[in-house]
Image (spheres, grey):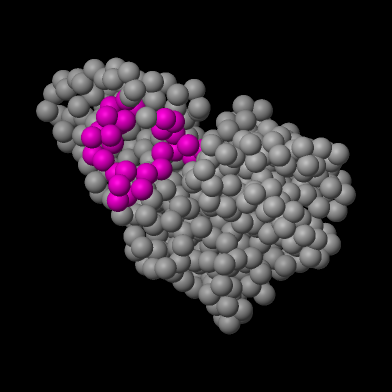
Amino acid sequence: MGKIFGTDGIRLKVKNELQAEFLVKISQAICEEFGERSVFLLGRDVRYGGELIRHAIISGFLTSGCRVYDAGLITTPALQYVIKNEGFFDGGVMITASHNPPEYNGIKVIDSDGIEIPREKENEIEKIYLENRISGKISSEEKFFIPKYPDPLDKYLEGILDNVDDEIIKRRNFKVVVDGANSVGSLVIPKLVKLLGGKPISLNSHLDPDFSGRLPEPTPETLFDTSNVVKAVNADLGIAVDGDADRSIFLDEFGNVLWGDKTAVILSIYLSEKNPELPKKVYTGISSSYFIEELLKKRGIDVIWMKVGSVDIARKLKKEGGLLGFEENGGIMYPKHQYVRDAGMALALMLEVMSAERKKISELYSIYPKTYTIKTKYSIDISKAKEIIEKIKNCYRSYPMIDIDGVKVLQEDSWFLVRPSGTEPVLRVMVESKIQNKEKLILKELEKIILG
């Protein structure tokens, strides 16, 4: 077996990769790494196979001397918040495949600080699994009791409210279209809007492991109906989340889909004034737009570029401090709340900015230059990815580039990124230009290299 952990946890295809024996053994390895008598909090989203995985993980923990509490259906950031703030749990496991299509499921392993475990801990768990270093300890029948953890979602929502000025938000009576991806975000985001004095209009907000045809990754293509609803009901804004509600994509009052790196620019500028004690720097993956740097530097905020992967961004943010960690896909990390992606916190912050600035969301985003973007992916044999990237580096060697994760090439009015996915056998390509149609020309050039 090769690498078990990917960019963001473990992902498995439900039909041919979901094997109880593997799940039991990997959870035993997790228990072994954390230590006997460790206490875990377990939660899941609505995906197929979730109950099978849940029972297998419980079996693995209990047969290795660990204890587990059940949080039930829950969002990833809510699970992380409880683990971080309760002071009782040594770690946790979230059963989810996040934004992947419905044929996938998987797990994210959470450390006691609420952040997904660092890469070193992932590597050690893999070694324990591969070397079969499982103790298999059962010390008492008491460990077969699986207590329900009470009211985790309510505690999470209280934590969000503690980190915003809810009074100024309530005065605005926002009308918000909430696209819950037919998963666990539907249990949280509409209630948060109500707690902040707004009116939620729920869309795709029933629980369905098929996601009812709306793929769980929020993109302009998957949010076509959401965009139309925002316009039809004259909403102040819309928010769409992914399958486990750690990522948030906003829509303005005209139904335009707003990428996460643009959201981060708005929030970073506001938070630099709200929290002057925080270091004026932000952390983001290489997939974020290169154009954000010029906007933030004008306001004295440094951008720290990193490999794609929320785990590494979160841990860097915790270690060195800053205003925000973020990803272009909608992952927003606010350190005064928790060091992880959190769609609920992102929404509360955006409503606070709109309230404090007395501006519509489209007005806030107007500071960003008009650009033209293409985001696509190509199914490839990942073993060929390195060869393709080297060819691209050679072809564009006269331009500045960043190669910490794939290759990002910087031109005067454009940039592009080519990198292998850490969760799927695909090559991801992103192109952005200030000149209309130039993004299409760049993509054509890249396709000649990628497709041979």
How many numbered callouts? 0
Q: In which image quadrant can residue 373 be found?
A: bottom right
In the image, is residue 445 part of the stretch drawn in magenta? no
Which is more toward the observer, 152 or 5?
5
Which is more toward the observer, 126 or 377?
377
Q: Is residue 201 left or right of residue 439?
A: left
Rendered location of residue 109, percent (x, y): 41, 35
Q: Does the image show residue 388?
A: yes
* Quadrant the N terminus occupies: top left
Q: Does the image show residue 68?
A: no
Rendered location of residue 262, percent (x, y): 70, 55
Which is more toward the observer, 92 or 87?
92
Residue beneath the point at 28% across and 36% down: 23
Rendered location of residue 259, percent (x, y): 65, 57
> What residue span does the magenta drawing correspond to?
2-30
Residue 398 sits above or below residue 141 on the image: below
Residue beneath the point at 32% across and 43% down: 17
Rendered location of residue 22, percent (x, y): 28, 34
Residue 328 sits above or below residue 311 on the image: below
